[in-house]
Image (cartoon, rainbow, N blue to C red):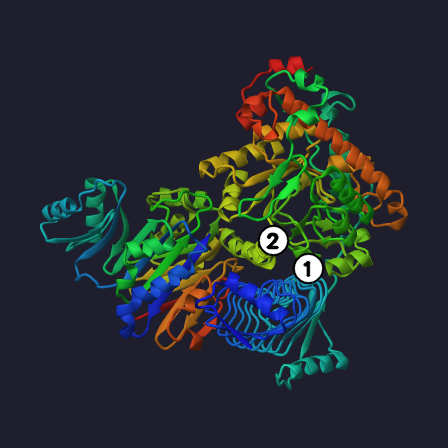
Amino acid sequence: MCGIVGIFLKNQALAPVLGRLLQGMLLEMADRGPDSAGFAVYRRPVPPGSVKLSLYATTSTVQWQQIGTDAEAAFGVPALIVHRDRHALLSLGTEAAALSAWMASAYPDVSIIGIGSEIEVYKEVGHPASVAEHFQLAGLDGGHGIGHTRMATESAVTVRHSHPFAAGLDICLVHNGSLSNHNDLRRRLARRGMSFQTDNDSEVAAAYLADRLGAGLSLREALITAGSDLDGFFTFAVGTADGFAVARDAIACKPAVLAETEDWVAMASEYRAIATLPDADDARVWEPKAGEVYCWSRA
Amino acid sequence: MVAIDLAVTPVREANQRIRALAAEGQDIDIINPDARHHIGVGLVTPTSVRIHGSAGYFCAGLSDGARFEVDNNVGWAVGDNMHRGSVVVGGNASAIAGVAIRGAEIVIRGNMGSRAGQVMKAGTLCCAGNASFLAGYMMYGGRIIILGDSGERVGEDMTGGTIYVGGRIVSLGADARETDLPAQERLEILEFLDRYGISFHGSLSRIENAGTKLRYGTPEPRSRPQPYDRGDEGGAATGYWNRRVREDIAIKAQIGRYRIRGYGASKPMPDFGDIDFARDVEKGLAHPDPLAAVSLETTVGSRSGAKPLGLSMPVMIAPMSYGALSRSMKIALAVASRLSGVAENTGEGGMLDRQREEADQLIYQCLSGRLGWNVHNMQRADAIEFYASQGAKPGLGGQLMAKKVTPDLAAMRGIPQGIDLRSPSRHPDVLGADDLVIKIEEFREATAYRLPIGLKMGAGRVQHDIKIAYKDGFDYVALDGVQGGTGAASTEVLENVGIPTLAAIQEAMDGLKEIDAGNDMDIVLMGGIKDGVDVVKALALGARACAMGTSLLIAAGCIACMQCHVGACPVGIATQDPDHEQRLEVRTAAEKIHRYLETVRWQIAALTLGLGHTDVRQLGRSDLVALTPEAAALTGLPYVPKRAATAA
């Protein structure tokens, strides 16, 4: 039960203000989700052969610099760590799988909430305005981003329960809606080796996507099979390294609006979020169809 | 022309100014609307409002008589429930444009989103571009003109009204069919288009209801409900296949569908009889005047700062519709509510003038079909209740069999007469807690933030739902357990879907405790509340007040034949047949209900006093024990079976 937004820049001249645009949209969705907020911004790729982790520490006593030093020692390459309170970005020249395996064993209290070459994930409890302020979203540049404001209805209000949920390398998902078969699906995915941090239905949707993508499906194909495998109602926005996608359930229960200009493509739960964007009045605006998948990418 | 700038004026303040300016005869320009929600909601004075930009949800919603123009796009539910007046949208409309309109003209120059015109009753919804899927979904009347393509499943489960399509009919919905277009109708449409400056020369297809789903097929034979009793004949073997089971099978073999009846669950489930008071209450019963010794006055619904309902005791009348009940019975309940100083509730289907005049305090319910729902009645109500579901049939809409859908009742509800009315199970504009926040805000705008807004909720997964209700800002929750009555529902649902009232209140309290909600959101508990004894137990478990329905019908003379759905109530309570209705004399029925309510008052006072309190708000869990392991498990009360021996 939430508000979701996404923006994808077609005109890279707007890249320096991506964070400001995303923040404007996110704050319009605060009424729909006053409990917590989160966003993913795709920006500043690390060099090939390197990986960027978005980290969240469950304890306040975390020593970020120590983690950086330990990672350098473990992998024998320089690490870059940038942190703010319980959140940090760790970049290192190694394989994603190796680094996440090392993190899990060396620092089990630190969750990886985003992983890839471009993705940076930020999420925190509290009003979306204070979350955006906390992470200084307005100052972030980037090529595209998605965001989420959450009204918790069934599971708890914590950072771990907040969106976006990572679903593989450079992939993350935000969800507005509610799934009915998530417990069953969670068990089935767990048997296939996926691990879960929460009882949240949206986390299951993200894991489902990760599993399907891992099985070789394209993002579009995975979102189409989601339409039959996920029981319930949903509007998803999904971010990838070079694009973003929007999908709705078969009867389009939750609101969604898409808009496109020469400069950008945007998605939001409500039009008022899109109205904050430059030249929104001249945009082509439409309601995405039920059961349809919409994808944009730079390729 | 006076301009209001939404960049500097909040919508709530802007709407107040719009009303004031309209009253002075001024036209209004809204600048920098930035797709704000609720622009123009609750405006009932004719005027012109020009919105220079885009509007959000519920633009011109719950309004009557004004002309709105929106230069750009609109969000969900433009013109919601609008009576007279018009909205012209220069750009596109999002989902459910023209939802539940009752006569207004809504014109969309661009495209419109899904479910346009859902549950509309009268008026015209016109889209110059293409419609999305399910246009005309469950519409009851009026016309939809789509000059472009129809979208998928146009006219799905429409009951009445007409849909005209200029472009391609992508696919027809269930129970919709294409027919010829009479020349006269074409002329009327062209006249309408001309009036809004839309030029159109193409051909039009006409879609109407096919009439295959308006009535149940084979009628159900009349029968008295059989008791849950395995020992009726010939020992255990036939006891298992007892008369009740056999009758059920035999009737379904005949009619080929679920059965329908009135009243709530009848199978044995834990109830208030399974808990008892923790101490002897003789002291209270022996007191010469408990009413003078105990404070009973109760307010409900002050959380948001609205004017709460003021009750002379923690009791109100449960929501029951004019439709399920006769007009005479609804008026008798209204009179009794005034005599006893409690609140009456409209239930589904609208407000009667006499009911409003007789009741000092009247709660007005909004249901999914928006039957008899309008801004004028909202503005003369004392509280608004958003119905999500009821205890007897959680998750389903109301049912009213054709015999009860009289011309008068159909006109009030805005539906065709003589159909087996099955109200939608979902609200068109609320598909989750996030949408609900915006819906409640619309109600508050329409009533100037003056009235408490409550949520009527059938007990299902109460522990989760109560948290949503709290988060959404309701002033109170009316919580209804499986023992709650109904005018008509399928027997399977009645007996098997809801959860016991006793469990419901406990889950509600547990849920609120989980989120540290305190006690500022009042719970009104209902669902089989028989008397003051039940009320005191409910209050001790945490309810602020109780609502009574079935018990008051019985007080008025109901013989519990459970055939409310048939419409031939022998005592004139649950009927629309004038010959039957005249058997109920309003004054006599009102006095019986009033006298019964006064015994309830005495019981509440005497028992509260007997438990050692002087105010009903002092009642608490320590006043109760559970008599059975089941009741102890449901409520967490101490299991004290020996109280059962004393009580007996």
Q: Is residue B224 above or below residue B644?
A: below
Task: Name the mark on residue B426.
Answer: 2
Disc 2 marks a residue whose amino acid type is Arg
Numbered disc 1: secondary structure: helix
The chain letter under disc 2 is B
Residue at point 56% right, 69% down? B132
Quadrant of res B26: bottom right
> Does residue B408 appear to the left or right of B236 in the view shown?
right
- Count of labels shown? 2
Residue B582 lies, in percent from the top left, at 89, 46
Q: CA distance from mark 2 to mark 1?
A: 23 Å
Quadrant of res A148: bottom left
Within 10 angstroms of label 1, few (less than 14), some, or many (20 or more) residues?
Answer: some
Q: Is residue B101 visible?
A: yes
Residue labelled with disc 1? B376
Q: Is residue B296 above or below residue A48?
A: above
Numbered disc 2: secondary structure: loop
Residue B580 lies, in percent from the top left, at 88, 45
Residue A97 lies, in percent from the top left, at 22, 50
Disc 1 marks a residue whose amino acid type is His
